[in-house]
Amino acid sequence: MPEISGTTPERGFPPMSFIESIRTVLSKYAVFSGRARRSEYWWFALAYTIVMSILYFALVVPGLTAYTADLMADPAAQMPGSVMTGYLIVSVVGLALFLPSLGVLVRRLHDTDRSGFWYFFAFVPVVGPIMLIVWEATEGTQGPNRFGADPKAVEQTSAV
């Protein structure tokens, strides 16, 4: 049997699965240090978008549709409580997922060797959000960087 003389890092770790990325992001609820792979970020972004869309279209849109019809019949109609409750639920879920979303975004920026403060670049009209999406889609730096080890690195044993 060959002896193990050491380990060498190699990029080639398979991408995270949908469920694995959600678990990872939620387990690092408010962690802003380290690095996040593209698959971790984008799977969570997809899950967040799906959850928020379902909640909005299930809880808010039907009430708004009914309210609009009532408003046309009676201009003094008041917004029904169901719409307000729907907005409240969507807002609470959005707030609960804000820190994990921000955390994974900062870790994703770290993977591209950028400070998390580049998040604020998103507030620059037109150019900011586009650049942020480009950086989120850019492959991370190979090997360790100032924010930590390469999340794609796998320790492989080399035989002598």
Image: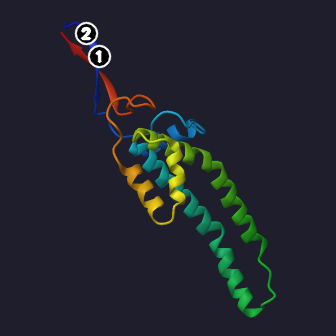
Q: Marks 2 and 1: CB-CB under 8 Å?
A: yes
Mark 2 closeness class: few <14, some 14–19, many ≥20 residues within 10 Å: few
Q: Secondary structure at mark 1?
A: strand
Residue type (three-letter) at the residue carrying disc 1:
Thr
User: Who's the residue at 18% across and 9% down the image?
Assistant: 160
Work out which quarter of the rendered image holds the N terminus and state it: top left
Please state if 133 lies on the left or on the right of 104 as rendered: left
The spot of residue 25 in percent (x, y) is 52, 41
The one of 75 and 147 positioned closer to us in this rendering: 147
In the figure, 2 relative to 148: above or below?
above
Please state if 159 lies on the left or on the right of 71 as rendered: left
Which residue position is annotated with label 2?
4
User: Who's the residue at 25% across and 9% down the image?
Assistant: 4
User: Who's the residue at 56% across and 47% down the image?
Assistant: 102
User: Who's the residue at 77% across and 77% down the image?
Assistant: 79
The spot of residue 57 in percent (x, y) is 59, 69
In the figure, 100 relative to 153: above or below?
below
Q: Quadrant of residue 159?
A: top left
The one of 117 and 151 positioned closer to us in this rendering: 117
The spot of residue 90 in percent (x, y) is 66, 60
- Please give the label number shown on residue 135: none
Gap between marks 2 and 1, in whole Å? Answer: 8 Å
Total numbered circles: 2
- Please give the label number shown on residue 7: 1
Residue type (three-letter) at the residue carrying disc 2:
Ile
The one of 79 and 137 positioned closer to us in this rendering: 137
Please state if 91 lies on the left or on the right of 39 as rendered: right
The spot of residue 56 in percent (x, y) is 61, 66
Q: Secondary structure at mark 2?
A: strand
In the figure, 6 relative to 127: above or below?
above
